Every structure is written in C-alpha cells, then in structure tokens.
Image (spheres, rainbow, N blue to C red):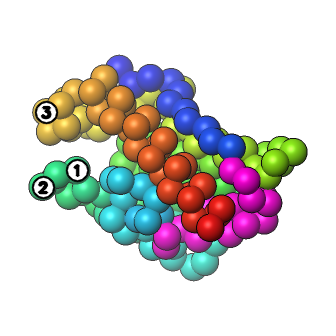
Amino acid sequence: MAAPVLQAQIDINAPVSKVWSLVSDLSRMPQWSPQCRLMKPIGGLRQGARTINLNRRGYLFWPTTCRITELIPEKKLAFRVSENGTVWSYELEPTEAGTRLVETRHAENGVKPISTLLTNSLLGGVPQFEEELVKGMSASLTRIKEAAES
C-alpha cells in the first residue's frame, strides 16, 4: 500500500521569483528529477493543462500524463498523474534567506491497483520504490537549489 504522503524540502538562498521560474518551467523537469526524462506541457502553463511525460529507471521506460490541478504563481504548482492518481506538488515559501521549497507526493486516497501491481512486479515493490522516490525528491531539490543559487 502506498504511503499517504512522501515529502522533501530544502532552503534556497534565492528569491521566490527565481525559484518559481525554475520550478514552473515544466520542460526543465528532466534537469531536476533523476526519474523524469521528458515533461512536455500541452497548451502552456495553466490550471487544467495536460503534460506528456516519459520516466526512466535503469533500462525501464514508461510514459505518463498529468493534469495541472493547482497553479498559484510563486506559491504552488501541483499536478495529478493520470496513471496512478497521485498528486505531486511544489510549494514555495519566503524565508529570511530566500525560499523554502517543498516537494510532496500525495496518495492519501491510495494509488490505482494497476500501479501497485506494476510497482510490485517491475520496480522492486512499493516500499523500495517509495524510498527511491524520496531520494529522488531530495536530489531534485538539490539541483534546483544549485541552479537558483548560481
């Protein structure tokens, strides 16, 4: 069974506007995420827009689609993955030194059964895969931090 919430956060010494410009450019997601190889927004960045994505783990590739469910400039960007029902979000909060960026994977209502079956049979099982996702979140946030602070 999927964990209801997976989360990672990082403090970045850059203004919210700069961090937002990096996070909200979904075509740059492959630069940040160890798993994402393509994220192509269809129709621009707006609530309700769809994305076409390609993910990779080792030799295994799989496509997904998402719908942007929440878009609050310089505060929050969230999208629902059609294939498993999870919602991924990036939340930005101003701090004295810059920005706190929080990445969350929401699965409070579980994931679709087919997703659990495929994760267990192809990705080493739900617990192992979720551990990998949290490590990937931390890596993504570190890469965003490096880009924002450069």
Q: Is residue 102 left or right of residue 36?
A: right
Nearest the eye: 137 or 4: 137
Residue located 47% across and 43% down the image = 137
Amino acid carrying mark 3 in the image: Ser
| Magenta run includes residue 15 | yes
Does the CB distance between marks 2 and 3 fall below 8 Å? no
SS under mark 1: strand
State which region is magenta. 12-28
Amino acid carrying mark 2 in the image: Tyr
Residue corresponding to mark 3 = 121
Extreme-bottom residue of the structure: 43
Principal secondary structure, stretch drawn in magenta: helix
Does the CB distance between marks 3 and 1 fall below 8 Å? no
Residue corresponding to mark 1 = 57
Q: Earlier in the sequence, mark 3 or mark 1?
A: 1
Residue located 74% across and 59% down the image = 14
Does the CB distance between marks 1 and 2 fall below 8 Å? no
Nearest the eye: 40 or 114: 40
Residue corresponding to mark 2 = 59
